[in-house]
Amino acid sequence: MKIRALYVVAEIVLPAMLLCFMATVFGRGEMERLSVGVVDYDFSATSRRVISLLSAVPTLDVAHSYANEQQARSAVSRGEIYGFVVVPPRFEADVEQNRPTQLRYYYHYALMSVGGQLYAAFENALRLVAAAPVVATGEALGVNERMLHSFVMPVVGVDVVLVNPTLNYTTYLAPPFYHVMLQVLVLLITVYAVGSEVRDGTARQWLERNRGDIVRAVAYKLLPHGVMFGVMACVGDVVMYELVGVPRECPLWQIMTASVCLVAATMAVGVVIVALLPRLWMAMSVASMFGSLGATLCGVTFPLSAMYGVFAGAARIFPMMHFARLMGLQTYAGMGLSAAWGHYVALLLMVAVSLGTLPLLRRRVERI
């Protein structure tokens, strides 16, 4: 009964909790009201306009004011704010007299996603401040608005974001992260279900009940778990793409097919691990490490093209990498099976490789 309860928790309860968490953790999917500070050495009307301009940016929340930069840096180190802007002394006078001056901003970039958002917000807000003196001078000289615009910004960039135009974090992170966490559970349960027979000394009876056929024994042992994990993977796809509203450029059945293939390939990797390692605790540890590395090397948080060649090549042994590529090709780019078939083949090859390690498992069982 305890083992059955373990399987129910690992295959139904935990995936359901993970699904609810990933579907709601990013809120509306955008970073808003990130706390920043201001160090104002000028205390002028112009510096107050700069602060008001920063406060008007939805990404920023100018929540604190500091007497000097040292206090602001300490606040960043303590996690009270993510960045701050420094308005230098005589800022208003320098602006009015067209003398060179600087508005410095600092931001926390250890959290890369937060740092990227702060950089973009500071740049967009302070660009207007930088152009203000030029605009004021031009207006004073009688230059018309069209000429001013062409002088201040001669080249206008147009950002066109494909697939995820609102830069919604739920769209980009929630579906792959749910499957990343699910594949760790799949690995652990696969290793435990097979390895516990060897650990408990019941592996010989288990093999005899299946007429000495190790392939049949492993298949019957893992089939219920595979079906349940496959169902939870597909339920996750339905929730993400139909209920949460994550956009997709392909039919839902293609995404669900990729999810089922991910579960099958991950279980195959679990079989390889338990066949090669003699102790259950060792196999469980390696399975946990393999699942964690799969999350790192799948290319979702850091592109494979930017990794060293050896790591980019090693990523091909992780099912999660091929699943992430399938999502990129099918879900985001809308490409069909003609562009993605190689990754399906790679996932199915992992199942074939696992069959080749079953004789090792059989010999260990026969020695018990």
Image (cartoon, grey):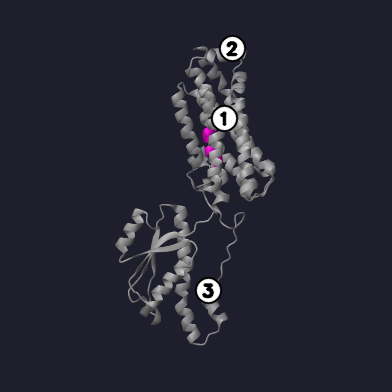
Residue 48: % across, % down: 40, 73
Residue 106: % across, % down: 38, 62
Distance CA(mark 1)–CA(mark 2): 23 Å
Identify the magenta region.
Answer: 178-185
Q: Amino acid at mark 3?
A: Met
Residue 129: % across, % down: 45, 73
Residue position marked by numbered label 3 in the rendering: 153
Say which element carries label 1. Answer: helix
Q: Magenta includes 145?
A: no
* Whether residue 291 is situated above or below residue 26 in the rendered picture: above
Residue position marked by numbered label 2 in the rendering: 208
Distance CA(mark 1)–CA(mark 3): 56 Å
Distance CA(mark 2)–CA(mark 3): 79 Å
Q: Residues within 10 Å of mark 1 (few under 14, many from 20)?
A: many
Q: Residues within 10 Å of mark 3 (few under 14, many from 20)?
A: few
Say which element carries label 2. Answer: helix
Q: Earlier in the sequence, mark 2 or mark 3?
A: 3
Q: Residue at the spot x=60%, y=37% of the render?
A: 233
Residue position marked by numbered label 1 in the rendering: 267
**Which one is in front in this view, the residue at disc 2 or the one at disc 3?**
2
Residue 208: % across, % down: 59, 12
